[in-house]
Image: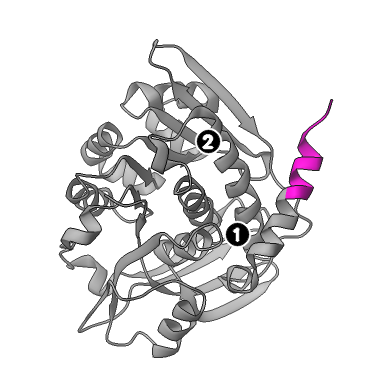
Amino acid sequence: MNNTALIYGTIAIDTLITPAGRANSVLGGSGIYAALAARLLTDDMDLVGVVGSDFPQEYNLAMEARGVSMRHVAQEEGETFAWTGQYETDMNNRTTVRTVEGVQEHWQMQLSPEQRQCAIAVATNVTPPLQFRMLEQCEAARFKMADFMKSWIIREREYTHKLLQCVDVALMNDEEAREFAGTDDSIEAGYRLLEAGPRYAIVKHGSAGSTLFHKTDGGSVRLFRCPAWPLIRPADPTGAGDSYMGALAGYLTHCIGKGEPTWEDMKSGMAVATVVAAATCEKFGTVSLFSLKRSDLAQRLAEFKEMTTWS
């Protein structure tokens, strides 16, 4: 057993269209955003995924230069997963213009014995069957995390339930949580998420922050509400949720050595995740995550603490 966070997600070529502009054929994918965010908090992380034969070598080199090893990323003959998304003026709303599943669609993940010994297993936004395949191979993990997407909650209902029963923390945004729970109330949805299996649920409210729900050993539920970092004119929200998850996992690698993360660990991790997710939105694609340094993050966290505490 080690203290590593193993991150699985898509590695993609994205085209991003927002009211602030457009970026064509840039590095993206849930695994990329999560890994770049996690590396701001820890060196104990690893990325697993698959790319096609068309994946630019320059992206491999860029990730390695930022401290994210690509040694466990498989390369298969064919196209790399690709996504084109267009955001409305209210950037909480977006439309998927085009998706190319590529080699991601048929890749059969087989984790190495070393990877199976990870302490934290992180299944970012891929389909629930692929997330479940990853998590069931991480039998030694002390903490398992999964993110969700509304379309997959609708199409893969059975797998969504299986996934919720095997994770310690489930992350959904407002729309996803309400869809799963069959309610128009996000707080009620958080309670219903806990009833489905996980000990923790995080419901993300976009510019309104996020809420942590925890099912205690005594059966009661407690809540923590973390405000959002105030953003002026965000450029691109792509990957913010993935960055949130990766940063949380990276922070928890420092807590997992003494046992399962505590309530206070989760609250602190949410604050860190909030700051990193906001930074992601400041520029297109992964540009902010590539340029953000650990010292920059420390400064932002100090500012966030000043914004959110009083005596």
Q: Is residue 252 left or right of residue 118?
A: right
Looking at marks 1 and 2 on the same chain, the residue that comes earlier in the sequence is marked by: 1
- The residue beneath circle 2 is 265
Q: Confirm or deny contact between disc 1 and disc 2 (CB under 8 A).
A: no
Number of the label disc, if any, that sits on residue 237: 1
Q: Identify the residue at image location x=67%, y=39%.
A: 208
Q: Is residue 10 magenta?
A: no
Say which of 7 and 128 sits in front: 7
Q: Is residue 281 visible?
A: no
Return the x and y of residue 215 as percentages of the image width and height.
42, 20
Return the x and y of residue 108 as percentages of the image width and height.
15, 64
Residue farthest to the right, as pictured: 311
The image shows a total of numbered marks equal to: 2
Q: Nearer the viewer, mark 1 or mark 2?
A: 2
Residue 142: name its quadrant: top left
Question: What is the magenta range?
Answer: 302-311
Q: Identify the residue at image location x=25%, y=44%.
A: 156
Return the x and y of residue 285 as percentages of the image width and height.
56, 70
Q: Identify the residue at image location x=51%, y=49%.
A: 251
Return the x and y of residue 232 as percentages of the image width and height.
79, 56
Q: Identify the residue at image location x=45%, y=11%.
A: 220
Q: How is the image coloured?
A: one colour
Distance between the Cα atoms at labels 1 and 2?
A: 26 Å
| Mark 1: secondary structure | loop
> What secondary structure predominates along the stretch shown in magenta?
helix
Amino acid type at mark 2: Asp
Amino acid type at mark 1: Pro
